[in-house]
């Protein structure tokens, strides 16, 4: 079964049309699907539309937040509620075309685990398209996951991806990056992007680009150094500590020389290098200490988490035979009645 997860915020005018298009695609392609609308604290009639659709069609489910928590939270709630083997997301504003659903499913059959949409021709304002393209290029360069449109709302996933990828904050746009870091295969298809028919974009604004850059740094750290933070923090700290040590060593040598030749070097209190070297030394020591603390926290949290991802195995799952023996031993200890 396919679970279609749709986050929405004040989109009551488009929901019935979107539902009709999805149902028509499912009928034409003979798809078994469910539709999960996640109302992110709408203040219009969106929830009433969702409840009406749910009453008339058992395939429709609705989740309503008490207030606006953001798109990542809405998607996370939808992923938890999804029952399908495949999960497809799209926006509720009718700009994503449901007719593309069969193409996503066909692309997954090529061995991919995540398929991201690419809006090559975008019907959005220039002040949204330009920065978005720059941001996408930056994400691809820093993470190594080469996608043209990381922020596209229309994506398709195998459900097992979300057993290992956890969303929080505003990391929803980086799901392909997080999945690729776990070894899942990520692909991309070009999709049709339609002009907005009703209202205006809800999940947008100038601040999202600054937040997106900070989230990108977070993702880069999580995917590159999430299990070994000391490699980054310790490396920076060690370089700073060595630079400070060399600076102080040089100043010590000049101080000794100045005992015999007072005019060879200016006094230490007149030299800016003394301040820079001392600050570098302290900063390096603090950064390495933070790295050690991060390693301790990571080791503690990793006791219940795997740092690897298993694609498949042969025979019985590891641990099955041990579990059977334990159950057998437990039964043998029970007194007979």
Image (cartoon, grey):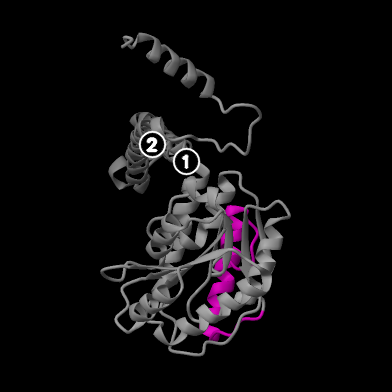
Residue drawn at point x = 50 percent, y = 63 percent: 173
Q: CA distance from mark 2 to mark 1?
A: 8 Å
Q: Residue 301 appears in which quarter of the rendering?
A: top left
Query: 249 or 9, which lies in front?
Result: 9
User: Which residue is label 2 attached to?
Assistant: 291
Q: Residue 58: image x %, image y %?
A: 45, 68
Query: 324 or 269, which lies in front?
Result: 324
Secondary element under disc 1, as helix, strand or loop, is helix
Q: Residue 312: image x %, image y %?
A: 63, 36
Specify the principal SS of the magenta part. Answer: helix
Q: Is residue 3 left or right of residue 245?
A: right
User: Which residue is label 1 attached to?
Assistant: 232
Crowd tier of the residue under label 2, counting other residues whose Cα lies within 10 Å: few below 14, some 14–19, many 20 or above? many
Pointers 2 and 1 in contact (C-beta within 8 Å): yes
Report the span colored magenta. 121-149
Secondary element under disc 2, as helix, strand or loop, is helix
Seen as rendered, the residue at the extreme front is 337
Q: Residue 133: say if magenta.
A: yes
């Amino acid at each position: 079964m396919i679970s279609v997860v749709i986050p929405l915020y004040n989109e009551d005018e488009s929901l019935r049309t979107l539902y009709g298009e999805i149902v028509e695609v499912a009928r034409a392609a003979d798809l078994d699907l469910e539709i999960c609308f996640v109302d992110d604290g709408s203040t219009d009639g969106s929830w009433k539309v969702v409840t009406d659709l749910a009453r008339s069609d058992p395939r429709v489910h609705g989740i309503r937040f008490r207030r606006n928590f953001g798109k990542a939270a809405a998607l996370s709630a939808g992923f938890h509620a999804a029952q399908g083997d495949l999960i497809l997301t799209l926006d509720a504003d009718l700009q994503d075309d449901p007719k593309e659903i069969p193409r996503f499913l066909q692309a997954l059959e090529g061995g991919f685990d995540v398929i991201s949409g690419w809006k090559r021709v975008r019907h959005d304002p220039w002040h949204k398209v330009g920065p978005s393209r720059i941001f996408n290029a930056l994400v691809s360069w820093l993470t190594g996951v080469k996608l043209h449109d990381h922020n596209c709302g229309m994506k398709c996933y195998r459900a097992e991806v979300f057993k290992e990828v956890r969303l929080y904050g505003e990391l929803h746009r980086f799901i392909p990056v997080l999945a690729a870091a776990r070894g899942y295969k990520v692909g991309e298809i070009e999709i049709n992007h339609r002009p907005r028919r009703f209202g205006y974009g809800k999940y947008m604004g100038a601040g999202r680009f600054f937040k997106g850059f900070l989230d990108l740094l977070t993702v880069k750290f999580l995917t590159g150094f999430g299990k070994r933070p000391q490699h980054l923090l310790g490396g920076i700290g060690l370089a700073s500590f060595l630079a400070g040590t060399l600076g102080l060593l040089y100043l010590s040598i000049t101080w000794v020389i100045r005992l015999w030749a007072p005019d060879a070097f200016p006094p230490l209190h007149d030299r800016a290098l003394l301040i820079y070297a001392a600050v570098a030394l302290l900063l390096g020591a603090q950064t390495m200490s933070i790295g050690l603390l991060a390693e301790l926290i990571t080791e503690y949290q990793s006791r219940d988490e795997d740092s690897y991802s298993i694609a498949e195995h042969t025979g019985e799952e590891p641990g099955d035979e041990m579990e059977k023996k334990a159950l057998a031993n437990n039964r043998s200890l029970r007194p007979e009645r």
